[in-house]
Structures are given as structure tokens and as C-alpha cells.
Image: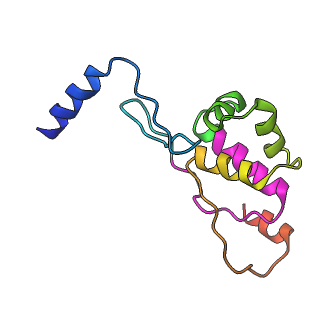
Amino acid sequence: MAHQRNAGRIAALGAQAPKLTLGEISPNIFLGGKAPKPMANPQKIARTPAQLGNYIRERRREVGLTQEGLAAKMGVRQRTVSDIETSAATRLETVLRALAALDLELLIRPRTKGSPQDIERLF
């Protein structure tokens, strides 16, 4: 019954879903259509800017976004997304916006023992 009521509300909105924002970032709300695929390996360890950029690129591709599409969700230029993915100097706030737009979060924990090369071999 609630599903029918919600379907009527969505139909009343027309083909376009409303654009909702929380501050400057749009939350990930899916009204019909396909939700992003879950990450193949949900936990990643990034110890270098290059590793973090690679994980962001991997997730962007998993959810089917181009750099331009991710940039639009973040409210930045495509070049900014490219800079993040290639580990160019980028503000932390911008990296956090990319993570949020990709439905990811940053987790801080004590460092595991091992070199970055050891970590790379795990993946």
C-alpha cells in the first residue's frame, strides 16, 4: 500500500526527480532507475595520493560516471576530478567531496605494518 502511494507521488513529480542538496553536496537518492553497484572490495587502504586517486577512479568507473559526471555531482570542473585521480595537489575538502559524491567515506585507523608495496600486492 505504501509502495503504491509513493509511486503516485513519484509519478506526480514527472520524469525529473527533484534536485535535493545538503549544503553544497547532493545526497545520493535514487527514485527508480539503477543504484550504483557495490564496490568489489569495500575496504581499501590508501597510503599515498596515487593509491587514493586510483581508488576514486575505480569507484567512479564502477558506478558508471565519467569525470565530467562526477565533476557535475561535486560542483567542480572536470580538470579537478582528473587532478584527484592523478594525485595532483588537491585540497582535502575537494577529495572529501569526491568521496561523498561516490558514496564513500574516509576512515582513520592505526596504520597496519607493512610497506606500500606490501599493500599493493594484496590487491
Of 101 and 116, which appears nearest the observer? Answer: 101
User: Residue at left 84%, top 61%?
Assistant: 48
Please check the rendered image and state whether residue 41 is part of the magenta-colored stretch, yes or no: yes
Quadrant of image for the C terminus: bottom right
Q: What x and y, as percent, mark residue 97?
A: 65, 47
The correct choice, above or below, for 25 with respect to 6 in the image is: below
Of 118 and 110, which appears nearest the observer? Answer: 110
The correct choice, above or below, for 120 with respect to 98 in the image is: below
Of 92 and 42, which appears nearest the observer? Answer: 92
User: Residue at left 70%, top 48%?
Assistant: 56
The correct choice, above or below, for 41 with respect to 30 in the image is: below
Quadrant of image for the N terminus: top left
Q: Residue furthest left?
A: 1
User: Residue at left 43%, top 33%?
Assistant: 34
Q: What x and y, as percent, mark residue 17?
A: 40, 26
Q: Residue furthest front?
A: 23
Count of numbered marks: 0
> Residue 116 appears in which quarter of the rendering?
bottom right
Q: Residue furthest top?
A: 14
Q: What x and y, as percent, mark residue 21?
A: 50, 39
In-image side of 118 versus 98 (left or right): right
In-image side of 73 versus 122 (left or right): left
The range drawn in magenta is 38-60
In-image side of 80 versus 62 (left or right): right
Please check the rendered image and state whether residue 112 is part of the magenta-colored stretch, yes or no: no
Colour setup of the view: rainbow
In-image side of 108 versus 87 (left or right): left
> Residue 83 appears in which quarter of the rendering?
top right
> Residue 102 appears in which quarter of the rendering?
top right
